[in-house]
Image: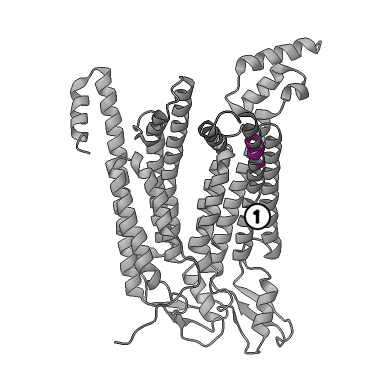
Amino acid sequence: MSWPALYAQLVRVNRHSTSLGKIWLSVLFIFQVMVLIVAAESVWGDEQSDFTCNTLQPGCENVCYDQFFPVSHIRLWSLQLVFVSTPTLLVSMYVAYRNRGDKRRLIQVSGFLGNKGQEEELETLKERKLLVTGALWWTYICSLVVRLLFEGGFMYALYVVYNGFQMPRLVQCNQWPCPNLVDYFISRPTEKAIFTVLLATASSICMVLNMAEVAYLIAKYLPLEHILGSESAARLVKSAILRRPNLALLSGLFRATVQSSDW
Amino acid sequence: APLIPPTTNPEPKMNWASFYAVISGVNRHSTGIGRIWLSVLFIFRILVLVVAAESVWGDEKSGFTCNTQQPGCNSVCYDHFFPISHIRLWALQLILVSTPALLVAMHVAHRRHVDKRIYKLSGRTNPKDLEQIKTQKMKITGALWWTYVISLLFRIIFEVTFMYVFYMIYPGYKMIRLVKCDSYPCPNTVDCFVSRPTEKTVFTVFMLAVSGVCILLNIAEVVFLVGKACGKHLHNAGDSSIGAWIQQKLRFF
């Protein structure tokens, strides 16, 4: 798995994200991808070869390993990382589509500018950072929600497949062709449990960051004036989420509500 | 001498080179002591981990032999005495200890962004000026000073925490030759032998010593930054004798 290539791709797309998005990318990369590469792959390396069983019956080991480990943790985490990075491509596709439309319009309009002026204009078009409004805002929110769903879905899948984040030392199996009930010993269960908990924690941090980013985008760009019915209320909600609370506005709103409710 | 074919490891290895490239990018904004810390980190920790320690611990499980043929006893005893391998602990320690430097990098990037915006608003859109902002070395003052000191404190806390965790899991920092184990399914008490205990002890002690040196460097850097800030503050406040003395002492760094 070429993690550096994935990282390069994500960083390119990340130019159009908010600062929370950039923090999310760093957390994802340091605490999930790096921990996965550095540690987890060496801990799970001998998971099948060291799956020892208390029987010499041929085939019993394969069958029992398959029953208890339908999908390895490492594969689940790699899939999770790939799926969680994919929604960002939605945003980059939309940005490319916008840029293409703008480029075409620019070429039509500035046909008389000559080659050099046109090239400079095209360069600024490529380098500019788009403002997150309108359809781009919706695309961005969709990508964040999809990311949240994937991250939560994979964590739930891991929890369900392995009955929690613990790894037992001993499992008992009586699938055919095992004679009666046979003891099986998993290799390095404690180390595996430690890394499962670590990666689950990193996943949760990423989910919290994504939720915070959704809240931030909604607060910054949603037309709250229409929804709440008053401009002062909208400003109050925005200042509460984006900056320190505006106490003057708070007291004014309180006074207005008290006066209007005829107590 | 017979040629020994190189052992090909199919698992993808951590690319510490790219990790170093990312971390050393922060190097431009750190103090002299910070650069020494980074070199010590890279040469004596990352390089030693990659070149030597990983081959010493390579056969930690396959070479862990128990005096019984009971299936499963080997696995269970290994798991009981080695909940987490030294190599993984050191790799996690290196990752965590390098992370605060990214805090500083993010702060510098934010400051540059703000400076660029101010430049654009004030009308100076000359591309040479904007390039200059990118390559300019930030002075460690104001909020950046706080970010830097906080990142240093986090570094110290992480290092000390890991040293403590090491001591709790492997008391005495020494690797024993023989462990006695009686967890199920081992029948009675069984002797188990650890592979390469002396070599492992040597490397453990070495990595610990380098950790200690890194902690000292970080503490020295904190003292230096605090001293510099105090010196400047006293100098500005008018009490020039102490301030000037502190500034003169710190100028050599």
Type of amino acid at the residue the image marks with label 1: Phe
Residue A130 in the image: state x and y as whole percent.
60, 34
Crowd tier of the residue under label 1, counting other residues whose Cα lies within 10 Å: few below 14, some 14–19, many 20 or above: some
Q: Is A253 drawn above or below residue B200 in the view shown?
A: above
Q: Which of B154 and B82 is in front in this view?
A: B154
Residue A177 in the image: state x and y as whole percent.
72, 87
Q: What element carries label 1?
A: helix
Q: Residue placed at 72% from the left, 25% from the top?
A: A223
Q: Nearer the viewer, residue B128 or A58?
A: B128
Q: Is A33 drawn above or below residue B153 in the view shown?
A: below
Q: Is B124 drawn above or below residue B188 in the view shown?
A: above
Q: Residue placed at 68% from the left, 76% from the top?
A: A66
**Chief SS of the magenta region:** helix
Q: Residue placed at 22% from the left, 19% from the top?
A: B239
Would you say residue B107 sits in the magenta stretch?
no
Looking at the image, residue A149 sits to the left or right of residue B147; the answer is right
Would you say residue A101 sits in the magenta stretch?
yes
Residue A1 in the image: state x and y as whole percent.
55, 63
Q: From the image, tell me which residue sits under label 1.
A: A83
Q: Quadrant of the image for the N terminus of chain B?
A: bottom left
Which range is magenta?
Answer: A97-103
Q: Give the quarter of the image for residue A95.
A: top right
Q: Give the quarter of the image for residue A94.
A: top right
Looking at the image, residue A186 sits to the left or right of residue B161; the answer is right
Residue A13 in the image: state x and y as whole percent.
58, 45
Q: Quadrant of the image for the C terminus of chain B?
A: top left
Q: Nearer the viewer, residue A135 or B253?
A: A135
For the question of whether residue B166 can be seen, the reply is yes
Q: Give the quarter of the image for residue A262.
A: top right
Q: Which of B137 and A192 is in front in this view?
A: B137
Q: Which chain carries label 1?
A: A
